[in-house]
Image (cartoon, rainbow, N blue to C red):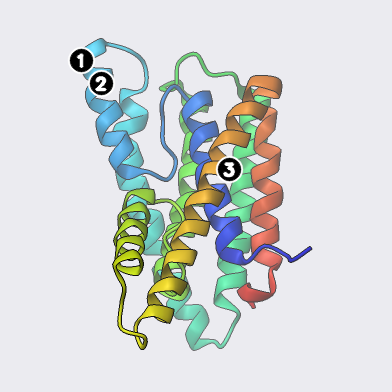
Amino acid sequence: MKRPGIGSLLSFNGGYVDTAGFLGLQGLFTAHVTGNFVTLGATLVMGTHGAIAKILALPEFILVVALARVAGTALTVADRPVVRILFSAQALLLLAFFLLAVGCGPFPDSDAPMALLTGFAGIAAMAIQNAVQRVHLGHLPPSTLMTGNTTQATIDLMDLIRGMPPEKAPEIRARFQRMLYSILWFAAGCGISAALYAWVGLWSLAVAVAVGAGAALHKEAA
């Protein structure tokens, strides 16, 4: 059986961690900034828990992306394996997310101090994934933003159906396949995360830790 590429692992965890975080932290998205804007509005209107977590998620996400960028530049200058080191840091943050979640959860109020700390660990992990992929793995489809992937895949599919010049068709077909695989792996992550959360609750985050470690150790992260 062919080993999944690093892009597949990232897309799987993109869906998996976001779903588990949403379910376990009262609607907090760990990797989807747009989603937190939407759920923040809903929280303020409905008077439910989670406003503080959603407000703080954006500045934390920005801060971690900035730190990942600075660290990546320093590691590049030092001729170190940037992707592997940063993905190892992400795996450690996912481990912290898991340990805090099972040790302190469940979280009926996601604005409680330990719930905030737990959410911040998950957000930091996914911020690193987004930063590393954008800077160092730009040839891969985004692993947490499926709106863009779905749009591009649909455009490419329509171009292939109506017929393209022979010299352009292979490039478009390859891009369509990359986008489709990313969408399918993300969807699989969402579905499996929801199923496992219903079964074992926040213990389901153990899978995210294993997948994150797999990405850090993957040959494409060298």
Quarter of the picture containing the N terminus is bottom right
Amino acid carrying mark 1 in the image: Val
Which label lies toward us, 3 or 2? 3
Give above or below for 59 relative to 80: above
Whether the residues at callouts 2 and 1 have beta carbons within 8 Å, the answer is: yes
Number of numbered discs visible in the structure rendering: 3
Asked if residue 70 can be seen in this view, the reply is: no
Q: Mark 1 falls on what kind of element? A: helix
Q: CA distance from mark 1 to mark 3?
A: 32 Å
Amino acid carrying mark 3 in the image: Ala
Residue where numbered disc 2 is placed = 42
Q: Mark 2 falls on what kind of element? A: helix
- Outermost right residue: 1
Q: Which mark is residue 45?
A: 1
Rendering coords of residue 66 (x, y %)? 36, 62
Give above or below for 57 relative to 89: above
Rendering coords of residue 20 (x, y %)? 55, 32
Q: Which mark is residue 188?
A: 3
